[in-house]
Amino acid sequence: QVQLVESGGGLVQAGDSLRLSCAASGRTFSNYAMGWFRQAPGKEREFVSAITWIYGMTYYSDSVRGRFTTSRDNVQKTVYLQMNRLKPEDTAVYYCAAASRRTDVTRSDSYDYWGQGTQVTVSS
């Protein structure tokens, strides 16, 4: 089992920055990648970003590429999502997730464990 705890969400204005954290505990040695997804009211959960634990390969959706950066701390078993130049359309609940096998990291059904989510609200 893997436990994931997100933090860092909040209310900001357009153009501001936020950094989300996702602390992993439990059987983290078996994880292949960590992903970030978000879900806005009335919309489906969508892929935001992902990073592989060993090589640190990163993946981004077109809507956040160039504004968001994913990184990881292998010692602390924590993944970060640095969000810059935030827009109102970035408003959503953000979830981190862990995939235990080599997979398509952009698909939500590739992930085995999920955090509880953290709210990000961007006002215009």
Image (cartoon, grey):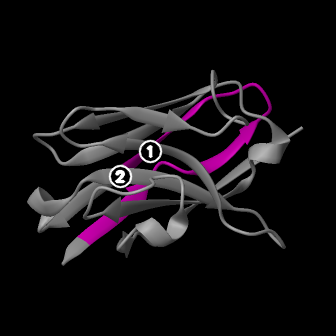
Callout 2 touching callout 1 (CB < 8 Å)? yes
Question: Up-down: is 87 above or below 41?
Answer: above
Please, what secondary structure does the residue beneath circle 1 have?
Answer: strand
Q: Is residue 117 visible?
A: no
Residue labelled with disc 2: 34
Give the residue number, with chain letter if any, for mark 1. Answer: 50
On the picture, is 122 further left or further right than 34? Answer: right
Q: Position of residue 8 (x, y in %)?
A: 48, 48
Helix, strand, or loop for circle 2?
strand
Q: Residues within 10 Å of mark 2 (few under 14, many from 20)?
A: many
Is tag 2's residue or tag 1's residue first in the polypeptide sequence? 2
Q: Is residue 78 magenta?
A: no
Residue at the spot x=70%, y=34% of the render? 62
**The disc label shown at residue 24, or none:** none
In the image, taking residue 17 as reference, residue 3 lies left or right, namely left
Q: Residues within 10 Å of mark 1 (few under 14, many from 20)?
A: many
User: In the rendered view of the protein, which quadrant contains the N terminus?
Assistant: bottom left
Please tell me which residue lies in front, 20 or 29: 29
Q: Which residues are magenta?
A: 3-21
Give me the residue at 73% from left, 36% from top. 63
Q: For the stretch drawn in magenta, what is the main secondary structure? A: strand
- When asked about the image quadrant of residue 6, the answer is bottom left
Residue most extreme to the right:
124
Q: In x, y percent, where is residue 96?
A: 44, 58
Let me know if residue 9 is in the magenta part.
yes
- The amino acid sitting under disc 1 is Ala
- Residue at image location 61% in from the left, 50% down from the top: 10
All told, the count of numbered labels is: 2
In space, the residues marked 2 and 1 are separated at their CA atoms by: 6 Å
Q: Quadrant of residue 67?
A: top right
Which image quarter is the C terminus in? Answer: top right
